[in-house]
């Protein structure tokens, strides 16, 4: 019984199954309807682009695991706007 409950490998089920990667979602916001970026990130496209430029001018760059400055900023702003937990942000 112990072996069946604890030692048998259980089937793995993928958790993050969105069709979009984080960067693809950011690109969709940047190229989509202007209200989408405002509603999701709380800033207009022009403000977002200006913030990205400020960060890049001050030495910010893609993270070690390849997360772009744009995606990092979008994650931060989305967190501020929604107040979601890290678990929910992962989606």
Image: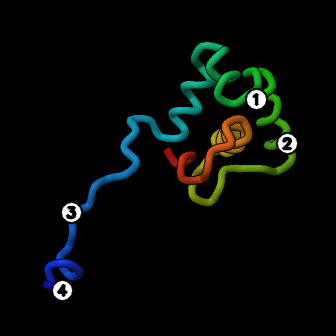
Which residue lies at the image location 66% right of the left edge and 14% below the top edge? 34
Residue 2 circle label: 4
Task: State the CA–CA distance, disc 4 to disc 2.
Answer: 59 Å
Residue 69 seen anywhere in this rendered image of the structure: no
Residue 11 circle label: 3
**Residue 23 falls in which quadrant of the image?**
top right
Side of 49 relative to 19 (left or right): right
Task: State the CA–CA distance, disc 4 to disc 1.
Answer: 55 Å
State if disc 1 and disc 4 touch (CB < 8 Å).
Answer: no
Per the image, label 3 sits on a secondary structure element best described as loop
The residue singled out by tag 1 in the image is 48
Residue 57 circle label: 2
Per the image, label 1 sits on a secondary structure element best described as helix
Q: Residue 13: x percent and y percent?
A: 28, 55
Q: Which label's residue is closer to the chain start, 4 or 1?
A: 4
Q: Residue 62: x percent and y percent?
A: 66, 50
Q: Is residue 59 above or below residue 46?
A: below
Foreground mark, 1 or 2? 1
Foreground mark, 4 or 3? 4
**Residue 52 falls in which quadrant of the image?**
top right
- From the viewer's side, name the closer residue of 91 and 68: 91
Q: Is residue 84 above or below residue 47?
A: below
Side of 16 relative to 33 (left or right): left
Tell me the quadrant of the picture where the N terminus can be found: bottom left
């Amino acid at each position: 019984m112990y072996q069946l409950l604890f030692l048998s490998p259980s089937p793995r089920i993928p958790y993050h199954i969105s069709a979009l990667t984080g960067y693809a979602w950011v690109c969709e916001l940047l190229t989509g309807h202007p209200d989408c970026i405002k509603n999701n990130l709380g800033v207009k496209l022009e403000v977002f682009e200006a913030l990205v430029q400020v960060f890049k001018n001050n030495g910010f760059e893609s993270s070690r695991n390849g997360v772009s400055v744009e995606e990092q900023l979008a994650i931060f702003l989305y967190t501020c706007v929604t107040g979601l937990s890290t678990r929910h942000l992962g989606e």
